[in-house]
Structure formats: structure tokens, C-alpha cells
Amino acid sequence: MKKDTHNDTTFIDTILLKRGIEAIYPSKEALREVLLAGRKLTMYVGIDPTATVIHVGNAIGLRKLAQFQKLGHKIIFLVGDFTARLGDPSDKEQMRRMLTEEEIKRNVKTYKEQASRILDFDSKVNPAVVKFNSTWLNKLSFGDIIELASHFTVQQMMERDLFQKRLNLISHLFAIQIIKCITSKCSFIISGIFNRMHLVAE
């Protein structure tokens, strides 16, 4: 019988928690301990549908998800349809154009098909699932946002390089980063380092 190397400590240390990884919060050691204990996690990677084609840079996060999926972890392919409507600038120096619902529907039409080249949505044992962040973000009230904002300070924002370089977008960035802290209940998130604030907040 062929040995399943995906459960080896060597695989976890040299590939799963190292290759394509810049940082792990709260720590690499904490995640390693959970994995070695055999605990199954729920994790996602989020992509805003700002174009009809998923950017090649997103393949890094998707491939990392695929590695976890092979280990039996629950995988969510999260479409940021709500944040796409807000013009989330992410790592850009200018605000993105706010998209209409019609544009988002057109862009996202083939997203699952594209992601299926890496993730397995048809597995009978552990299929990846697609979710949209508008499912819960559309339900937010202004009071909910104010309550969430009370957990962060302007100083925390200004300490980040992302905000220092984008002072003209500071209010927009502040609001979007706060909203991003509200996600589907997950134990692990794969994202670009520019989303560090909501990664830490999770």
C-alpha cells in the first residue's frame, strides 16, 4: 500500500506550513500543533470578482487550500461579491471602481469552473464549497459596524504600511477592513499579507 505522505510531519513542516507562506497568525507553531493533533479545520480563501478571470496570483492561495483539502479539511471558496461593490482597494494605491450587481454576476459566472482546476468541488468525501460574503454582510446594520469599529484604534491603522501610503483612501480603507473582519465561521484563512489586519482580528 502506498504511504500517504500528506499526513507526515515532514510534509507539514516542509511544504504545508512553509512553501508559499509568508506569515501564519497567531503562530506557525500553534497551527502545526493543531494539525499534528489531527483536528480538522474549516478554511477559506476570498477572491473579489473584479474581472471575469481569476488572477494568476490567486493560484497560490488556491493551491495551498488544495493541499489542506487533501488532508480532509473543509474548504470554502469565498467570493467577495459584497466587497467588490464597495471598490475594495486591497493592495492597490487607488480605489477600485465600485461594481454593479450585474457586473459582479457576469464576472463570477465561471469562477467555480476556474477554481475547479485546483480545488475539488465534486469530491464525494470532502467537496469544496462556494460561498458569497454578501450572505452575511448584507445583514449588517450601521450599529453593527460601529460596535465592530470600537475594537480598533486609528493608531492600529496608521501603523500599517498599507494605510500610510494611502492617506487619501483612509476612511474607505478603514471601513472596508473593519467589514472584512466579519467572515463566515472559519478556523483558518488564506490571504495576501495586505489583509493582515483582518487576519489578526479573526
Image (cartoon, rainbow, N blue to C red):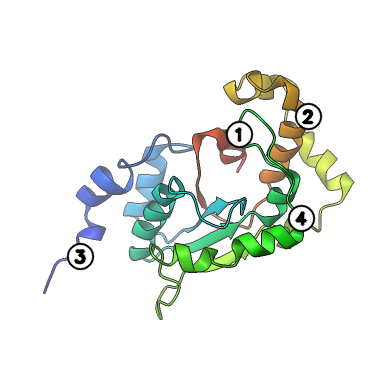
Q: Which residue is identified by label 2?
A: 171
Does any portion of residue 148 appear in the rendered image? yes
Labels in figure, total: 4
Q: Amino acid at mark 4?
A: Thr
Residue that protrudes farthest toward the left in the picture = 1
Q: Which residue is identified by label 4?
A: 100
| Label number found at residue 88 | none
Quadrant assignment for the N terminus: bottom left
| Label number found at residue 197 | 1
Q: Is residue 195 left or right of residue 66?
A: right
Q: Is residue 47 left or right of residue 63?
A: right
Sequence-earlier tag: 1 or 3: 3
Q: Residue 100 in the image: x percent, y percent?
A: 76, 55
Q: Amino acid at mark 1?
A: Met
Q: Amino acid at mark 3?
A: Asp
Question: Which secondary structure lies at badge 3?
Answer: loop
Q: Residue 11 in the image: x percent, y percent?
A: 23, 51
Q: Which residue is identified by label 3?
A: 4
Sequence-earlier tag: 1 or 2: 2
Q: Amino acid at mark 2?
A: Ser
Whether pointer 4 and pointer 2 mark residues with C-beta atoms closer than 8 Å, the reply is no
Q: Image height check: is 183 above or below 28?
A: below
Q: Residue 180 in the image: x percent, y percent?
A: 67, 45
Question: Which secondary structure lies at badge 1?
Answer: helix
Sequence-earlier tag: 2 or 3: 3
For label 3, count other residues whose C-alpha is less than 10 Å away and answer few (under 14), some (14-19) or many (20+): few
The answer to which of 114 and 139 lies nearer the viewer is 114
Q: Image height check: is 62 above or below 174?
A: below
Question: Which secondary structure lies at badge 4?
Answer: loop
Of the two numbered discs 1 and 2 in the rendering, the one whose residue sits closer to the viewer: 2
